[in-house]
Image: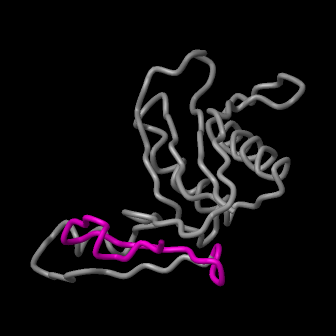
Amino acid sequence: MRKTRANIPRSPAASYARTSDRQAHRLREDWQNEDKTDQFAARSQGRRRYAQALEVESASRLLFISGQIPESAAGELAPTFEEQARQAWKNVFAQLAAAGMKAENLVKVTTFLSSREYALANRAIRKEALGNHAPALTVVIAGIFDERWLLEIEAIAAA
């Protein structure tokens, strides 16, 4: 049974992306109620690089990627946030590759940052890693298990 958009609750400024068998990994946003008087919606539309909601239709495989830490396979940890973020994304991509998937298969990404000060750098590196792909996204400021880690990334992918 196929889900329809009517089954998905949306806020007035929500974006909606859907995948299907023919468009398995091509996401599109459908803005609903583009009310320019809503200052938040107008301000955030131009910079949004994620889907407010993402429906996966007919996926035969789901991959749940545990939090990927910013250490290399050899246990090396870079000193800067930018280097750690790139390493964490490399680790996410390694998990995807092991399952025969790519970045375009990502449907949900949660990034845990150790401090708000890394928010802008995180956004830039995420865009570098994902390009124009826009999965559902959450960023949480949290105490991370190892104080040396400045971030951790977990994800869900579908194929």
Q: Nearer the viewer, residue 50 or 97?
A: 97
Q: Which quadrant holds residue 152?
A: top right
* Residue at far left of view: 37
Residue 155 pos. (x, y %):
59, 45
Of residues 145 and 105, the one drawn nearer to the viewer in this rendering: 105
* The one of 130 and 159 positioned closer to us in this rendering: 159
Predominant secondary structure, magenta span: loop
In the image: residue 121, left or right of residue 95? left
Which quarter shows the C terminus?
bottom right
For image coordinates 64% across by 68% down, the residue present is 131
Outermost residue to the top: 146
In the image, what residue occupies the spot 82% across and 31% down? 72
Q: Which residues are magenta?
A: 1-25
The residue shown at (90%, 25%) is: 74
Left or right: 129 in relation to 33: right
Report which quarter residue 46 is drawn in: bottom left
Left or right: where 3 falls relative to 121? left
Residue that extends furthest to the front in the rendered view of this protein: 1
Q: Position of residue 38 (x, y in %)?
A: 13, 73
Q: Is residue 91 magenta?
A: no
